Amino acid sequence: MVEEICRFCGRVAIKTSRGYSLCRYHLLAYDNLHSAYEAWKERLGELTWGNFLRKASELPDTGAWVKDIALAELQKEQ
Amino acid sequence: MSALQSLTSRGDYTLVICEKPDAARRVAEALEERPEHYKIGYSEVFLVERGEKRYVICSSLGHLYTVADLVKRRSIYPAYDVEWVPISQAEKSARIAERIRVISELAKKANFFINSCDFDVEGETIGYNILRYACGGKETVALRAKFSTLTAEELRDAIAKAKPGLGGNLAEAGRTRHIVDFMYGINLSRALVESIVSATGGYRTMSIGRVQGPTLSYVVEREITIRNFVPLPYWSADAIIQKDGRRLTANYEKEKILQLKLAQKVIDDCTGKDGTVKEVKKSVFREPPPTPFNLGDLQREAYRCIGLTPSQTLYMAERLYLDALISYPRTSSQKLPPSINYKKILTGLTAMTGFRDHAFLLLSGKLVPHEGPKDDPAHPAIYPTGEIPKRSLQPKEFKLYALIVRRFFAVFAEDAIRERVAAIIDIAGHIFKVNGRTTLRAGWLAYYADFISHQDKPIPDFVEGEKVKVLRVKLYDKFEQPPPRFNQSSLLAKMEEDSIGTKATRAEIIHTLYSRGYLAEASMSATSIGFSVVETMQAHSPAILSIDMTREIETSLERIEAGGIDGEQVVERVMDELGKSLYSMKRAEAEIGKRLNSAVRSVVAEENTLGTCPVCKEGNLIIIRSRASGKRFVGCTNYAKGCRASAPLPQRGIIRPLRKACKTCGWPTISARFSRFPMTFCINVQCPTKGKKWVRNG
Ligand SMILES: [Zn+2]
């Protein structure tokens, strides 16, 4: 059996989500990104997934692993 | 007759063993102004005759003995067969071999022994090992001298009142700590190194240990949080009001408004409206003086005020101690007992212009220190001895000394009394606050002013019901921030809080994590090697990363100190635990090696990249080692395309890219560490700053 590796960092993948193989760090980033989207909508009102991704990936304090996921999701959007 | 023979020929003396050469000189000079001085090879020995008694005073160089494994092959683990051997045997040091020989010779003709090493677990261990191995089993009959400063008076007193030792428990605890740490360190580190060897055939120094493990783990955990952080938006608002011709900022009562529509409503409601003063709140509060310094407090404060790293502070503080300017710095205590003689110290300090006025001022009042809760059985908090420096101190060293003196002053001073004023202003039903703060009595702040900022912010008098003109209200878009990365000071505080390591070793452990390449930059981020080591340990030896195991061992060591258990029991348990981890690592050796190696390669590539080439603006400047000469220099990755940008590098020391361009010429800057104090400079030989000497930033 070939070990699945995380498509972002090469660590051992523990889960495949929406077509990505993710390590435990990137899986956490993936989950954080999705729950943050809900929180952003709650605070800002209307907000599309695409706009959220664009804004979140530009912020300097967004974590590096979250940015990996956000940019990949953004590509899917386009 | 050799110096050693003439010294020992008469016999019948007390051999006094000190921890360091400077301490031996101080002890000798305390007993007699001009002691007879013998130079035997590298070692200095003093002879003092005092009434009937004769003292021969010699010194160690810190530890002379170390734990080593009997099987000396680096590639073999587990290594459980350990013993105490002269450091000279483990590391080949002629100085230490000679020192042990001199002490052994001196011991043969001595009829009494005094252990005069620093009075704590480490000093006890150093003295015990020398008495046992170099002096031929004198550890049970030797007397113990106890002191906290190297001033003449205290040393004379300590030698005169030396008492039978503490019964070896303290030394047994110290010796067990060394054995346990050695076993963890050597075995797990060998397992890491061997995995790289088995995967690549190459060697790289790797280490992990009982204290390194949890410390590295803190940084990695924090890094994971930061890399997975998503900032959430929030808003804040303020109003600019006009009062007596002054513009003042009034902050909206809630620091964070969590919904845009609520924030927008505040602005919409308030725009164009004036305000009314609803209430003026005044409160007087006291700020008690700080507590006396223990080592951790001093290291944190020196980092904050002087920019010294914890290991630099410890190093400098030890020199000040050896110069008898301050008391023993490796202490946990925040207490200053009256026996240190406050008056004498302050009177001594009046001889220095910079301290004179404040020392006199304190002398005119009652002297009661504001102590903290922490205590140390061996030493009081750090305090100045009141002696005048006999050599000129380096600028940073003087600052550290001044910090210790000023802190000593501050703990005896009165509380500061300050007043907080808040004018509560209602604008269209929303509450804003103008905050002010003034000092009514400076108290200790006056003594500590060089090291603390306590800026006052007075505001005009507001009256309830008064109308105020609002010039504008404004909304700010903000985002929540991730927790900060650790710095040397906050990591040290965290180790202290969780009782990881000892006050004497914490700074050195942080230093090691850097030198192994596990951490990068001043704001500590974990490198891929750091991550990889932690991930390996999580899989095979999770206990080494957790503070629970360390806590358990610390508790056992305390029980040894109290005489409840013996060291062997503790060591046996450690072997049990360790065996399981090592077995698991051995089985996964190749896999671990492959991962570690790829982490090492990515970090090395990053460490060798200095920045974009300022000449071709396309390639990167990287550190290259010449195959022909073995020398390192800087070249551009665009060399093949014709870019000839290059620069020489110092051939010694560890070089790190600073990721900052030189302000003068735009070339990359680097730091080079030859000693404890790194130098930073621009690599460009043509740079106008080159006329000057390299800038020390230590
Ligand atoms: Zn990953």
Image (tube, coloured by chain):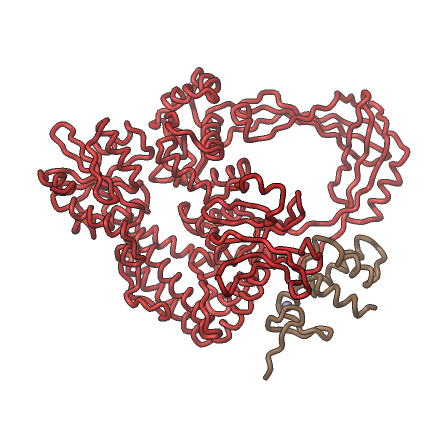
Chain colours: A brown, B red
Q: Quadrant of residue B525?
A: bottom right
Q: Position of residue B275 (x, y in %)?
A: 85, 29
Q: Is residue B275 above or below residue B570?
A: above
**Vertical position of residue B206 compared to residue B415: above or below:** below
Residue B651 showing in the rendered view: yes
The residue lying toward the viewer, choosing from B197 and B208, is B197
B443 in relation to B379, above or below: above
B523 or B541: nearer the eye? B523
Q: Report the side of B92 relative to B54 (left or right).
A: right
| Picture coordinates of residue B188, whole percent (x, y) | 42, 65
Q: Tell me where residue B540 appears, x and y as whole percent.
A: 47, 69
Residue at 48 percent across and 40 percent down: it is B299
Q: Quadrant of ligand 1?
A: bottom right
| Quarter of the rendering containing residue B284 | top right
Is A36 or B690 nearer to us in this picture?
B690
- Seen at 34% across and 40% down, the residue is B377
Which residue is found at the position 79% from the left and 57% from the top? Answer: A55
Query: Where, quadrant-wise, is the N terminus of chain B in this rendering?
Result: top left
Rendered location of residue B37, percent (x, y): 21, 35
| Depth order, front residue of B101/B476 | B101
In screen coordinates, is B356 left or right of B253? left
For image coordinates 82% across by 21% down, the residue present is B245
**Name of the residue lying farthest toward the left:** B10
Q: Residue furthest right?
A: B272
In the displayed structure, does residue A30 sit left or right of residue B330? right
